[in-house]
Amino acid sequence: MKSDVKFIARKLLDRVDNPRKLRRVGELCFWLAGFRRRVNRSLPPENIVVIKLDRLGDVVLSAQLLAGLRRAWPQTRITLLVRESLLDLARLCPDVDEAIGVPVDEWLMLFDPKTKAYGCWQQQVAKWLRYCHQAKLWRKRFDAVLVPRWDTDYYGAVPLAYLIGASQRWGVIETATPDKAIANQGFDQLLTHVIAGQSVRHEFLLNESFLHALDIQSGENQKLISWVKEPDRKNAMEMLRSVGVDFSRKVIVVCLGAGLARKMWPVEAYASLCRTVFDFETIQLVTVGTAAESDLGLQLKEKIGSIVINLEGRLPLNLFPAAVSLGTLYIGSDTGTMHLAAAAGLPVFEICCHPLDGAPDWPESPQRFGPWSVPNRVVQPKQASAPCKTHCAAAEAHCILGVSVEKATVALRSLLEETGMKGICREP
C-alpha cells in the first residue's frame, strides 16, 4: 500500500494543474494501483462515501438524502466526510456508519477567467493526497463517492472525490448555476455520473432529485429529519436549566449572527422587535451561536434585560441540535441554526437579506434555503439597495437594513397568532 501511495502521489503531482490533466494522469495511476474496479450497478454498493464539506445548514438539509441511502441500501457501509468543525454534529446522524472530519480551505481550486488558470491547484491536490493517505481513505476501497452540492464547489470536494479512488463518482453538473459554470470549469471530467439540475427549487427537493438519479425513491416524510435523541434532549435541558433557562416560560431561540455580516439584522432592531411584540413575563430568550458572536448576545441582554440567556459559544456541538429543539420558536438570521429549528418542528421567523425582487436561484434566496415544512414568516427587503442589484453583495449589513422593525412586527405577530402563541404578545 505504501508503494501505491507514493506511486500515485508522485505521478499526480507532476504538472497536474487542471481537471483535464488530473484525469488524464490519474486514471492510469489508479488503475495500476488496483483501483477503479468495475462495480455491478444492479447490486447495492458495498461501501460508499458522501462528501459534504459545506456549512452547518447544508449538512442539516442533507439528512433526508442520507436517510434515503440507508433506506435503499441497508447493508451498505456509508461514510460521511464533513469539515472538521462539524464532525461532532455529523456523528449524531443515525444513517451513517462513520463520520470523518476534513481540513477545508476555501476558494483554492476555482478557475479564474482573467488569468485562465486555477488557483493553487497543485498545492490543493497535494494536500488532498496527503489527507487520503493520513485518513486511510484508500484502504477503505470505496465503490462509489457522492458529492451532493448544487452550488459552486468552493471547497474542492469534486477533486477530493476523484482522488479517493472510487470507480463511481456522482456529482452535480458544473453548469448548474452560472457562477459554478465559470468557477468549476472542467470539474465534470472528474465524475463518472453527472447529475443535471438547473431549475430553482428548495435544497430539500434538490437533495431528493439526487436520490432519484441513483434510482432511489423519495420517502413519505417530506419534513426535515432531526438527529436529536431523547438522552441528548435531557442532557441539553439540564445544561440550560443550570444557566438559568426557565422552562415554565416559552423559550424562544434567537440567532443574531450569521457567518456573513450582510445577513445580520442589527441587534438594536431585534431588541426593538422583542420590546414591541413580547410580554416579557411569559417568555425566555436564549441566544445561540458561535463563540465569535458572543458579544451579540451580550448586547441584546444589555438592551432588554435578564430575560436574555446568552449561550453563544457555550453549547457543545453535540448538544446544540438538542438545545435548539427545546425552544418553542426560532427568531433570527438565515443560518444553519434556523434549519436545525425547522428540523425540530419549531415555527421559524427569519430576517433575510435577500431582496424580494432578487435572483431566485441565489444561495441566500428563501426559495432555495428558506425554512422548510414548518409554519414560518420570512421578512425581506422589498428591493436591493444600490449598488446591489440581484442580491446583496455587500461585506456588511446593507440590503437587510431595508427591513423595518414595523414590518417585522406585523409578520411576527401574524406567525404567533397562526401557531397559537398569541398569549405571549403584549397589547399593541
Image (cartoon, helix red, strand yellow):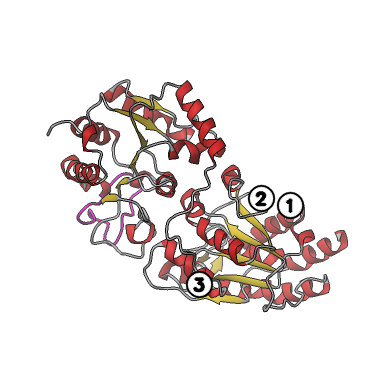
Rounded to the nearest whole Å, what is the CA distance between mark 2 and mark 3?
A: 26 Å
Can residue 179 be seen in the rendering of this structure?
A: yes
Where does the image place residue 128, in percent across and percent down from the top left?
Answer: 68, 57
User: Which label lies toward us, 3 or 1?
Assistant: 1
Q: Magenta stretch?
A: 379-399
Where does the image place residue 287, in percent across and percent down from the top left?
Answer: 39, 32
Please state, as top left, top right, bottom left or bottom right, where the N terminus lies in the image: bottom right
Where does the image place residue 200, in percent across and percent down from the top left?
Answer: 36, 69
Quick one: SS at disc 2? strand
Residue at the image position 34 percent from the left and 47 percent from the top: 263
Please identify the dominant SS of the magenta region. Answer: loop
**Residue that mark 2 sits on:** 100
- Residue 257 vs residue 281, the one in the foreground: 281
Quick one: SS at disc 3? loop
**Residue that mark 3 sits on:** 174
Q: Earlier in the sequence, mark 3 or mark 1?
A: 1
**Residue that mark 1 sits on:** 135
Rounded to the nearest whole Å, what is the CA distance between mark 3 and mark 1?
A: 28 Å
Residue 285 lies in quadrant: top left
CB within 8 Å, label 1 to label 2: yes
Q: Tell whether 220 sits left or right of 265.
A: right
